[in-house]
Image (cartoon, rainbow, N blue to C red):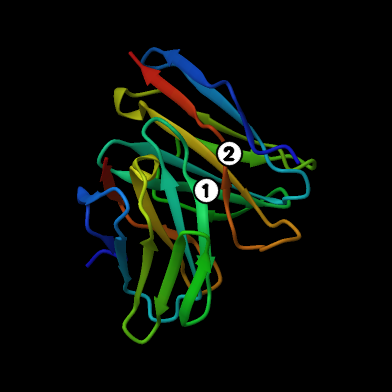
């Protein structure tokens, strides 16, 4: 069974631009969570989607948004990029037929904002 | 008080020794507990989940849960240099939103 895929793997943007990241969960998983990881800050929860509905949201500004499609694929968007948005963005899927609670991560998208 | 706390380390152990990683949490009603391993530059990888008090073993890894004392630990027997990584503890909160709360991780170094 294929794992979680994220595209693109690397991105370089400049301040003020916007970016869209994509995540395809494991087949059969209906929940997708997004995290931001920076050195020293650990995993910061952005949001979680389940069956196309946002189920949870972290404490990030409105510049960060997301959505989930009917095939469970998810995208997150960051508008008006700031230098501090440089980070590894991780997507995790869960909700499969095994342990419903376990999250499995994709390889991440490393975003650099110049 | 942070919701999930881990010693940042680094925890240094010799090859072949037992590495003991600890995690405490503040929400007494938490139900699900997870250990992840993260190599530098890579994404977290699930090692083990545990839901009931007691021990759960998987190969060289043993997770221990004590809900009364609100801690969960991970033991790595016969530690190998390839176990050198950051270990993240995650706890599923109670309530309707049931977010997964993460510790900052413990850095483990296994010395040959």
Left or right, A21 with reference to A35: right
Figure quadrant of residue A100:
bottom right
Depth check: give the residue in front, B1 or B4.
B4
User: Secondary structure beneath disc 1?
Assistant: strand
Q: Quadrant of the C terminus of chain B?
A: top left
Q: Residues within 10 Å of mark 2 (few under 14, many from 20)?
A: many
Q: Position of residue B89 (x, y in %)?
A: 39, 59
Q: Residues within 10 Å of mark 1 (few under 14, many from 20)?
A: many
Is residue A79 something one can see in this rendering? no
Q: Which mark is residue A64?
A: none
Q: Is residue B107 above or below residue B32?
A: above
- In the picture of the structure, the residue carrying the numbered disc 2 is A66
For marks 2 and 1 on the same chain, the one whose residue lies earlier in the sequence: 1
Residue at 27% across, 63% down: B5
Chain to which the residue tagged by mark 1 belongs:
A
Is disc 2 in contact with disc 1, using a CB cutoff of under 8 Å? yes
- In the picture of the structure, the residue carrying the numbered disc 1 is A47
């Amino acid at each position: 069974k294929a794992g979680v895929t994220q595209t693109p793997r690397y991105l370089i943007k400049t301040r003020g631009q916007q970016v869209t990241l994509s995540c395809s969960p494991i087949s059969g998983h209906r929940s997708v969570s997004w995290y931001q990881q920076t050195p020293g800050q650990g995993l910061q929860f952005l949001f979680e989607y389940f069956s196309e509905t946002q189920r949870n949201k972290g404490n990030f500004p409105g510049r960060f948004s997301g959505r989930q499609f009917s095939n469970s694929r998810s995208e997150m968007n960051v508008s008006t990029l700031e230098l501090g948005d440089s980070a590894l963005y991780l997507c995790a899927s869960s909700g499969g037929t095994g342990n419903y609670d376990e999250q499995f991560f994709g390889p991440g998208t490393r975003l650099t904002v110049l | 008080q942070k919701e999930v706390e881990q010693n940042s380390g680094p925890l240094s152990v010799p090859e072949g020794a037992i590495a003991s990683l600890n995690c405490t949490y503040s929400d007494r009603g938490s139900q699900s507990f997870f250990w992840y391993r993260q190599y530098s530059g890579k994404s977290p990888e699930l090692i083990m989940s545990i839901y009931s008090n007691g021990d759960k073993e998987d190969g060289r890894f043993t997770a221990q849960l004590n809900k009364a004392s609100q801690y969960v630990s991970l033991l790595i027997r016969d530690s190998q240099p390839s176990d050198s990584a950051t270990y993240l503890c995650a706890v599923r909160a109670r309530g309707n939103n049931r977010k997964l709360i993460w510790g900052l991780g413990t850095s483990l170094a296994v010395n040959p």
